[in-house]
Structures are given as C-alpha cells and as structure tokens.
Image (spheres, rainbow, N blue to C red):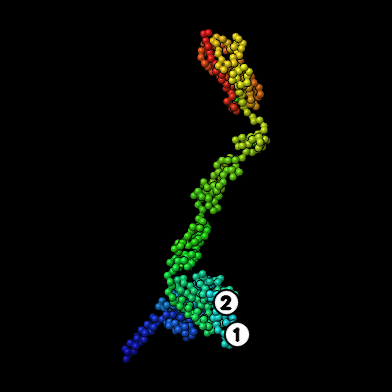
C-alpha cells in the first residue's frame, strides 16, 4: 500500500515536473493567491502556460526553463534577483525601470485622469481605458510611461502618452537589444479597452518572437556589433584616443570609422597640428618676412610651440646713423642715414692727369715733350720723367705708400698726411739703361698707391701703361 503511494507520488511529481517544464511564462507577483485575472485570461487566449512565481521565491526559481519573464505591477523585494537579461520579458511594472534596464532611474512617470486615458501610436489616438462605471469614483486610473528624459536609447516607443500634446515618453516600449523586452505601462487591466488588451497581446507576442538576426544598418548596436550607424555605443573620437572630431561606424558595423577624427598632435612629424604653432619644416606658411624681418631663414622650435627667428635678418633701422645698403636702406627711404657721406678710406691714382695715358705721364727730358702715344717708345740711355697723381677720395688723412714698377726696376716714395680731397703728383726721373734691367722690348709701367687701412675701392689704386724700349739707334 505504502509502495503504491510512493509510486503515485512519484507519478504526480513527474507530471508536475513535466507541467512545470512546459510552462511558457514565469509570472512574478507579490501574492500568488491574487494573480491578475485579465493577464491570465490573455495567457489562456494565447494558449500560453504560466507559473506564478512569488516575490519571495524568485531566488530559488530556475527561470531558464521559461520562455518569458512576466513581471506584474506589484512592488517586489527581490526585483534585483530577477535574471532579466537572460530571458525575454514583459514588464507591467512601474517601479524598477533602472533595475530592469529601461531607464536611468527606477520610478516610471505616471499620468492619472478621471477621463479615460489615451495613447498615441503611429499618429493615431487610442483610448486604452474604458469609461468608468462609477461616476463617483474619485481616484483616476493611471498609466505609467518611460519619461523621455530618462529612457534608455535601446527602448523604442510603440505608444506614447497623449493628453492633447506631444509624447512625454513611452507607455508601451520595445527593446530588441539582447533579449526582447516589452514595457507595458497600462497597468490597470480591469479598465482595459479591447485595444489595450490587443496591445498587451502584441507585447507578449513581441517578447516571445525570436529576435531576428541582428541587422547591421538598423542604427542599433547589436551584441555582435561594435557599433551601428548612429549608435556608437557611447564612444567618441576622444574615447578612441583622438583629439576630437566626429566618430562614425564602419559600414559592416564591426569597427569604428575614425576618418573624421582629428588625431592627437605629434610634435616632430613635420605636420603642424592642433595647438602646435609649427612643426619642423611645416611653418604654417610663415617666413622671416611675415614675422616682420627683412629676410633670412625662419625655423620652428623643437617643442613645436613657437618660432625661432634666430636666423632672421632684422629690418634696417632708419635713424641709427648707418645706411644699411645691403638691407635696401637708401637715400630715398632713409635720407637720415643715407644722405650723409659715409666714412671711407680711399686713395687712387687719378686718371685725369693731363698728357697722361691711363694716369701715367711720361716726358722725354731731351725733347721736353710728353709721350702720348698708346704704345710710346722709350730710347735707351735717354732720361724720362714719369709722374702720376695720387688723390685722397676718402674722409680720412692717409699715409700713402707710392710704388712704381717698370719691369725689374722699381722705385717708391711716401706721402704722409694726405688730407681728404687733396692729391699729390709723384715724379721720377728715369734713365733707360741696362743697369736698370731695361732691355729692349715691350713692358708695362705699373704705379700703385696703398694705405694701411682697408681701401673702400681698391680697384683704382693701381694704373698701368704699356711702352716699348728701343736700344741701339
Ligand atoms: Ca544593428
Ligand atoms: Ca605635429
Ligand atoms: Ca640705418
Ligand atoms: Ca682706392
């Protein structure tokens, strides 16, 4: 007898096991003795089996054997223990929006009215609660909504609030992110219109529908995607290590498109970036001239934060007493500096000595005549007077060394304290003779005036004259 009882018990347990194993819905509520009849009616309508899970039993329930978690509109002690992310869910509960991954805060917003409430869906206005039978009833029938200010972007509005104005948030809201989720804010099922009931069915149907393959291009980052269109998973160029810019998603949703991100500047890569002033050869179009200098070579400092004008040539300063000719200062643009004679040392052999050829004058002392032919003839054993004029063209008194060279023979003289503007004629009487190494032939006579200071124009310090020496006439 006892054995039979045990067998019977086993069969019952097995049956119960099968029954529980084949349930579709885990209906979570405060008190399993008081389930919401309208919900149960819909489950039955839809041919769905359910188990009532008491709040206190949440932790010891194996939810994975269900297809759907259904959360009724009760306050629960164990809301955080519900494995909401592992199963599809329908949430007809306004208290735990954050816990259930709908919003950034827990409490849903509420609209109450004594008039039957309406929602707006696809531009249609739909009454969701029936006219109340008892007109003396003071408390309105509320519905709840996910306030747009707190709603997570994964939640997609199916129906919004309607009070003759725009939607304040979602009264019915779906998410396909991860497991399907439906928030259903029309909690007062006793007052449901047919349409509200139909919405409720849609909500369950939606939650139970297997998620389609994640689609790249739906602007929702699915679990296998890095990003999708405008859904960048809260990433930015900056979070991706760039300086700034607009992050985008690649067309295959598998990587970020950083084309419009501005990279962090690297000083030394030859490219002026961001707050860099310049970078090596990239001077950002600047030159010494644009920096206000006369010329030269502008450089970038090694820290990229400023220019080096070390090799720039400054502009001439008009009024500094120096005519800076090499920097385009002249008598026109700076008479103050350039109109005054420049101090200079300059002596020269004058070319304007009368009867001279190229400044060198030769007189035949026998005939007392000057030789004025281009190639003058000088006769052996005859005396000639050779003279030339040394002039001081500079601004300083000069001590002048005067040298004459006639082939191997040379003579010199000195004129000390030759004042600016003065000149001196140097004369030398020369007997053309073999003793003086003056053989027949063609020679140059060279005369030079020199000073110890740098002569500003050394080219005019030496003059030459070509002559022919003839002997044996
Ligand atoms: Ca997607
Ligand atoms: Ca750089
Ligand atoms: Ca000057
Ligand atoms: Ca000179």
Asked whether 373 or 129 is in front, the reply is 373
Q: Nearer the viewer, residue 357 or 214?
A: 357
In the image, 192 versus 138, the foreground residue is 192
Which percent across, then down, holds residue 447? 57, 19
Q: Which mark is residue 162?
A: 2
Question: In the image, is the residue at mark 2 within 8 Å of ligand 1 by its beta carbon?
Answer: no
> Would residue 239 be visible to someone looking at this image?
no
Q: Quadrant of residue 405?
A: top right
Residue 450, how many percent across, how many down? 58, 23
**Residue with the most extreme bottom position:** 1
Disc 1: CA contacts within 10 A as few (<14), some (14-19) or many (>=20): few
Residue at position x 43%, y 66% from top?
Answer: 224
Asked whether the residues under the numbered discs 1 and 2 touch, taking CB atoms below 8 Å apart as contact, a structural biologist would say no
253 relative position to 405: left or right: left
Side (left or right) of 352 relative to 260: right
Of callouts 1 and 2, the N-terminal one = 1
Q: Quadrant of the N terminus?
A: bottom left
- 24 vs 109, left or right, is left
Q: Nearer the viewer, mark 1 or mark 2?
A: 2
Residue beneath disc 1: 138
Tell me what residue is drawn at x 51 percent, y 78 percent: 184
User: Element type at marker 1?
Assistant: loop
Q: Residue at x 52, y 58 (%)?
A: 245
Q: Is residue 288 above or below residue 126?
A: above
Q: Calculate the distance from the C-alpha at mark 1 to the C-alpha at mark 2.
A: 21 Å
Q: Residues within 10 Å of mark 2 (few under 14, many from 20)?
A: many
Total labels: the figure holds: 2
Quick check: can you spot residue 351? yes
Position in image of residue 394 (x %, y %): 64, 26
x, y percent for residue 336: 68, 35
- Badge 2 marks a residue whose secondary structure is strand
């Amino acid at each position: 007898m006892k054995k039979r009882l045990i067998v019977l018990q086993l069969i019952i347990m097995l049956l119960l096991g099968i029954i529980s194993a084949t349930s579709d819905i885990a209906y979570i509520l405060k008190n399993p003795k008081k389930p919401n009849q309208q919900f149960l009616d819909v489950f039955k309508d839809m041919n769905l089996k359910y188990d009532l899970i008491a709040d206190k039993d949440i932790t010891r329930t194996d939810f994975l054997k269900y297809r759907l978690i259904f959360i009724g509109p009760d306050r629960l002690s164990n809301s955080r223990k519900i494995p909401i992310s592992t199963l599809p869910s329908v949430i007809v509960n306004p208290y735990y929006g954050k816990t259930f991954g709908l919003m950034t805060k827990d409490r849903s917003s509420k609209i109450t009215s004594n008039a039957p409430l309406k929602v707006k869906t696809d531009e249609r206005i739909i009454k969701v609660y029936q006219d109340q039978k008892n007109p003396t009833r003071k408390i309105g029938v509320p519905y709840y909504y996910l306030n747009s200010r707190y709603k997570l972007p994964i939640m997609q509005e199916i129906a919004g609030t309607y009070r003759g104005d725009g939607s304040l948030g979602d009264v019915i809201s779906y998410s396909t992110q991860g497991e399907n989720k439906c928030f259903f804010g029309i909690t007062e099922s006793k007052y449901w219109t047919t349409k509200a009931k139909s919405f409720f069915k849609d909500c369950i149907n939606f939650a139970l529908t297997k998620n389609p393959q994640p689609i790249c291009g739906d602007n929702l980052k699915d679990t296998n995607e890095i990003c999708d269109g405008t859904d960048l998973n809260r990433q930015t160029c900056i979070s991706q290590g760039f300086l700034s810019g607009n992050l985008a998603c690649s067309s295959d949703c598998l990587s970020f498109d950083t084309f419009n991100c501005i990279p962090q500047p690297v000083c030394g890569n030859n490219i002026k970036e961001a707050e860099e002033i310049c970078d090596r050869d990239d001077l950002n179009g600047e030159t010494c001239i644009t920096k206000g200098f006369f010329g030269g070579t502008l450089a970038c400092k090694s820290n990229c934060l400023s220019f080096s004008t070390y090799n720039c040539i400054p502009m001439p300063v008009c009024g500094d007493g120096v005519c800076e000719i090499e920097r385009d200062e002249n008598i026109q643009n700076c008479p103050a500096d350039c109109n005054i004679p420049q101090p200079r040392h300059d002596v020269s052999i004058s070319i304007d000595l009368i009867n001279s050829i190229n400044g060198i004058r030769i007189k035949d002392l026998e005939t007392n005549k000057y030789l004025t032919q281009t190639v003058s003839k000088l006769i052996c054993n005859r005396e000639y007077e050779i003279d030339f004029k040394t002039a001081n063209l500079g601004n300083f008194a000069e001590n002048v060394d005067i040298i004459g060279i006639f082939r191997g023979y040379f003579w010199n003289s000195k004129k000390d304290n030759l004042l600016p503007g003065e000149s001196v004629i140097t004369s030398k009487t020369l007997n053309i003779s073999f003793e003086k190494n003056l053989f027949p032939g063609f020679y140059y006579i060279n005369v030079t005036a020199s000073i110890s200071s740098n002569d500003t124009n050394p080219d005019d310090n030496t003059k030459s004259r070509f002559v022919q020496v003839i002997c044996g006439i």
